[in-house]
Image: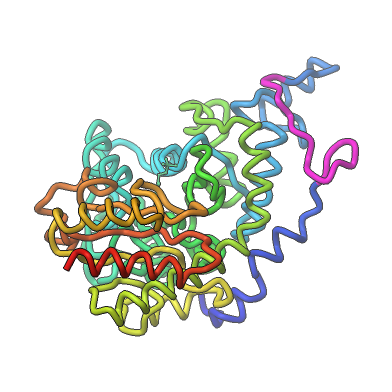
Amino acid sequence: MQKPLKPFLMKNDPSTKIFDLLQFGEFGDVNPSVCDSATFTFMQATTMLDTFHGETEGCFLYSRHWNPSNKYLADALSAMEGTESAWVTASGMAAITCAILQICNSGDHIVSSVTTYGGSFAFLNNYLKKFNIDVTFVDITKLDEVKKAIRPNTRIIYTETMTNPLLQISDIPSLAKIADENHLKLVVDNTFTPMIVAPAQLGAHVVVYSMTKFINGKNDCVAGAICASNEFVNALSNVNDGTAMLLGPALDPLRSSSILKNLHTLHIRMKQHSKNADYLARKFKNYGIEINYPGLKEHKGHHKLTEMMNPEFGYGGLIAIDMYTVEKAFKLMEMMEKAGVGYLAVSLGYFKTLFSNSGKSTSSEVPIEIQREMGLSEGLVRFSVGLDNDIENTWQKIKSCLEQMG
Ligand SMILES: *Cc1c(COP(=O)(O)O)cnc(C)c1O
């Protein structure tokens, strides 16, 4: 990527890209008509055969392959990311596992950030052994470590734009350069930072999402997406050997149509999540609590994220504080739930604030020794800050909990 980062990103402002799309239904309905059919008719048998061979345009065959409602959502997502194409899946894990299995064969090797979503870590560390696929885990912010880990059989560099739960920032342009020089694919999970960062615009080859989180934002379903080139998405959905087609984690079209409507408010929600998270981060800091938020100048990834981001959406809705012990973390979370700060629950990107102790929840798949090695404190409490209209009022509730903790 030789182009200057910021102007390039601004030109591809994801919020305007989605709104540029003209998608309406068969009756002129403002929301595209929902297509709840599993199969599709043909008037000519030869057209069906051609569709099986991938030789027709705009023909639908069977909904595990493609469905019009899924296509509307996929088109909106590829517009947002600036990729040629996208495929929507029944969960974020389906997006991640299908993307990886599409690229790797038995005997291949992956270089991955050690801090990733717990399910991704478990898949990379435990499950891929079945296929004799080796994974080297590195500190993804140390580019020398990444380079050193690459072997002749390496196929993927895997990371998250903002890693879970340490909120480290991946240098996507530099990782893309390393990937290109070594003929690898850079696969980036952008679940924490939709609209804030567009990884494909910075050189990532495949962008994966858990749409369960910010993109849908309602916590009423699990869903995922893979955004990539036409070639990659066609390969994924190929009837003979496509991983998504053959493993079959297609998203229910009724869900696709509801997620598409929520996608259209994502830009407003991201701004409010970021604004509230930034507010709480500064309050925690002034109170003397150890706080991790990429929007703070002292955060190690602050400068890098500032370079890569679309500034109007802020530094994201996630913050992490350190209570040092599990006992203190548990006590604070129970008190905050009772005080009405939000819910003690895993997941993120919901309109209400959610908090959990990462070491004992979403990162519990990561062995304790590795948790310590990567710097994950046992007392870490991760907050996904909600859309509260009066965040000062929320802070007052948190503050009174902290005061009662002593
Ligand atoms: C939740 C999450 C996933 C997994 O997504 P599901 O929709 O739960 O399958 C993957 N990556 C990240 C960063 C997540 O937060």
Q: Nearer the viewer, residue 362 or 88?
A: 362
In the rendered image, which quarter is residue 151 located in?
bottom left
- Left/right placement of residue 272 relative to residue 47 reads left
- Left/right placement of residue 227 relative to residue 37 reads left
Coordinates of residue 19 in the picture (x, y in percent): 74, 60
As drawn, 271 above or below 37: below
Instruction: Indicate yes or no whether the magenta region holds residue 403.
Output: no
Q: Nearer the viewer, residue 406 or 125?
A: 406
Q: Give the range drawn in magenta.
A: 24-39
As drawn, 58 above or below 320: above
In the rendered image, which quarter is residue 320 located in?
bottom left
- Left/right placement of residue 29 relative to residue 349 reads right
Q: Which of 386 and 52 is in front in this view?
A: 386
Q: Nearer the viewer, residue 312 or 229?
A: 312
In the rendered image, which quarter is residue 292 located in?
bottom left
Residue under the image location 79 percent in, 15 percent down: 45
Looking at the image, can residue 147 be seen? Answer: no
Residue under the image location 59 percent in, 59 percent down: 81
Residue under the image location 77 percent in, 36 percent down: 58
Coordinates of residue 175 in the picture (x, y in percent): 38, 67
Count of marks, rendered view: 0
The main secondary structure of the magenta stretch is loop
